[in-house]
Image (cartoon, helix red, strand yellow):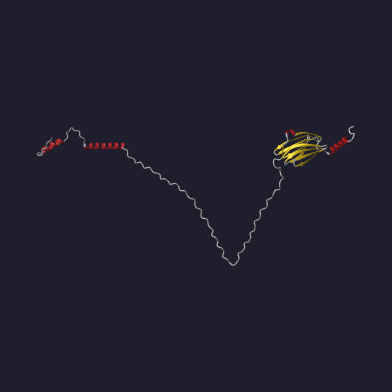
Amino acid sequence: MIRINFLEPGAGAAEAETALAPPADASFLSRREAWFGAFLLVAAVALLTAAFWEPAVEEPAPKTAALEAPPQPVAPPEPPPAAVAEPEEPPAETGQAPAEAEPRAAPPAPPAAKVAPPADPAPAGDGAAVAGVAFVPAEDDLEIRFAVRGDFRTNLFRLDNPNRLVVDFEPARLEIASESRTQEIAHPLAERLRIAQNALEPPRVRCVIEVEAFPETSVNRAPESVTLLLRAPDGDQSQSQARAASEAAPGAGR
């Protein structure tokens, strides 16, 4: 405890300065060092704060997309109202009678179409049917009769090497049994007959008659038959008649 004697200013002031003065060997900081230390401390705190402090970043609020309104259907334009013709007012009656309208000339008639001449009628249906063949022999001639039903055409011609007479029925189909399609005639005017289906499109039946010499021929048609007549020539016919007369005379052959 320091006692200050205020009554003796001289001695007391000296003692007070001695008591308050720091010893000579004490290590106290000077004012400049204190300010420098404080500056270093503030700088260190500032560096640490800048290193570890992250400023809060405000996130932008999400933008809400504006809902687009669906397109409204466009109504088609309304058609303009049809113009209504106003009725014409009747003409005022006058004392004169209305003039009669002149008659209009009729338009010319179109030219008449040319009509083509009718073609030859074709046989109806699938054609005829050749159903049979028969022989009627005589002394100087031979009849070959064909049973034919339907519509058809006939064509008669000759072939040689060997000699043959050919008769075609067209359109026609053959309805004769196969065993009767070849027949022996054994007549002076014809030797053998063959008949067959010669073609299918168009259908054609062909009859071939084998002859030694070509006789005179003619074709006669009836509603359901065709007759082919074979006749010997005039010279052969006279010889056959003379032979028949000699055989019929009394005493012939004695």
Residue reaching furthest to the front: 250
Q: Residue 52: image x %, image y %? A: 31, 36
Relative to 185, is 79 on the left or the right?
A: left
Given residues 202 and 243, the one toward you in this image is: 243
Residue 195 location, quadrant: top right
Name the quarter where the C terminus is drawn.
Answer: top right
Q: Residue 20: image x %, image y %? A: 15, 36
Relative to 142, is 45 on the left or the right?
A: left
Q: Residue 110: image x %, image y %? A: 66, 53
Residue 160 location, quadrant: top right
Does 222 sit above or below residue 97?
A: above
Given residues 10 and 176, the one toward you in this image is: 176
The number of callouts visible is 0
Given residues 39 and 50, the one toward you in this image is: 50
Residue reaching furthest to the bottom: 95
Q: Residue 119: image x %, image y %? A: 71, 46
Name the quarter where the N terminus is drawn.
Answer: top left
Residue 66 location, quadrant: top left
